[in-house]
Amino acid sequence: MSTVGGSFAVSDLLVGYPVAPAQAARYLLGAAVLVAWARWREIPLRRPTRRQSGRLALLAATGLTGFNVCVVLGLSHAEPAAVSVVVGTTPLVLAVLPPLLSGRRPQPRLVGAAAVVLVGVAFVEGSGTTSLVGLLFCLGALGGEVAFTLLAVPLLPRLGPVAVSVHTCLIAAGQLVLVAPLLAAATSTPVVRVPTAAEASATVFLALAVTAVAFVAWYTAVGRLGSERAGLLAGLMPVAALVAGLGLGTDGATVATVTGAVLVGAGVASGLTGGRIAAVSSARGTPGAVRG
């Protein structure tokens, strides 16, 4: 999540480039790198079953393709801060939704920690205005961010983080190629054009760091921590973006942003500690609770 947040400055280089081809190229290159790495490390890339393939397609459509489309279209109707704050509710949603779906009560301490993280994110990002259409796109992006984690949970035990990342990236690349004309028409941009050197470099960086590395790291964390506790770490994205901005000299620290960063850190630390205790205690009475 820190890698994703710290890459926002690089993503700014692609603002003027058509979204669909840039993201499709990023996912294809990221998948190719992961396949090469898996062969070198002798990590098996298991072939998904028909049911798993359907879940992977849904994961790609919501967590990758749908998320990108909603963010791009949302930014034309809402300020970036509004999009960030709505997507920043991910820790709270992941603290509440998974236990409800599995018939359990959400852990109060984990929900409280997620709320603290959300307040911290709001301090870091500030406020932003949005229209009703913009809000709907923001909620769509939030749904995509949540689906990116929850839909992968049942796939990780058999396929593993690397295979899930590879299959999802390949499917998303194909989906983005299909929606490229529609997205170009909606944003009044060309379907595709030759990228500049800066745009090509940004795409390569996103493919390596934010796709190949970050996807596998995230799915490994979800498999080991569970989606509820791992979701807290999503609050690190705006903090990492702030730190990167300070390092590049594009942003300055204020009392609000420093306060927000401290709140995010406190919420994550509290939730990870409390979540581990709660997960272990619940596992004693319910087999498989930790893995779930």
Image: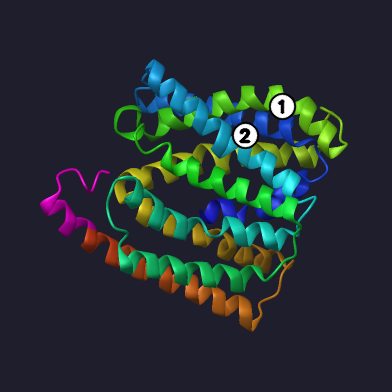
Instruction: Report the side of 21 relative to 145 (left or right).
Output: right
Instruction: Report the side of 209 relative to 93 (left or right).
Output: right
Please report the residue visible at 36 percent of the width from the left and 49 percent of the height from the top.
Answer: 98
Please report the residue visible at 46 percent of the width from the left and 55 percent of the height from the top.
Answer: 93
- In the rendered image, residue 262, in percent from the top left (x then y), is placed at 49, 76
Residue 36 visible to an observer of this rendering:
no
Which residue position holds label 1? 179
* Front in this rendered view, residue 134 or 265: 134
Q: Is mark 1 on a helix, strand or loop?
A: helix
Type of amino acid under label 2: Thr
Q: Check whether the beta carbons of the residues at disc 2 and disc 1 lie within 8 A of each other.
A: yes
Q: Which residue lies furthest to the bottom in this view?
A: 255
Please report the residue visible at 60 percent of the width from the left and 31 percent of the height from the top.
Answer: 27
Q: How crowded is mark 1: few (under 14 residues within 10 Å), some or many (20 or more)?
A: some
Q: Is residue 137 above or below residue 263?
A: above
Q: In this view, does 116 lie above or below 61?
A: below
* Front in this rendered view, residue 118 or 198: 118
- In the rendered image, residue 288, in percent from the top left (x then y), is placed at 19, 43
Which residue position holds label 2? 65
Q: In this view, does 126 lie above or below 225?
A: below
Type of amino acid under label 1: Val
Q: In 3D space, how far apart are the residues under numbered discs 2 and 1 (Cα atoms)?
A: 9 Å
- In the rendered image, residue 283, in percent from the top left (x then y), is placed at 16, 52
- What's the magenta region? 279-292
* Rendered image quadrant of residue 28: top right
Residue 284 among those drawn in magenta: yes
* Rendered image quadrant of residue 240: bottom right
Please report the residue visible at 58 percent of the width from the left and 78 percent of the height from the top.
Answer: 258
- In the rendered image, residue 111, in percent from the top left (x then y), is placed at 38, 65
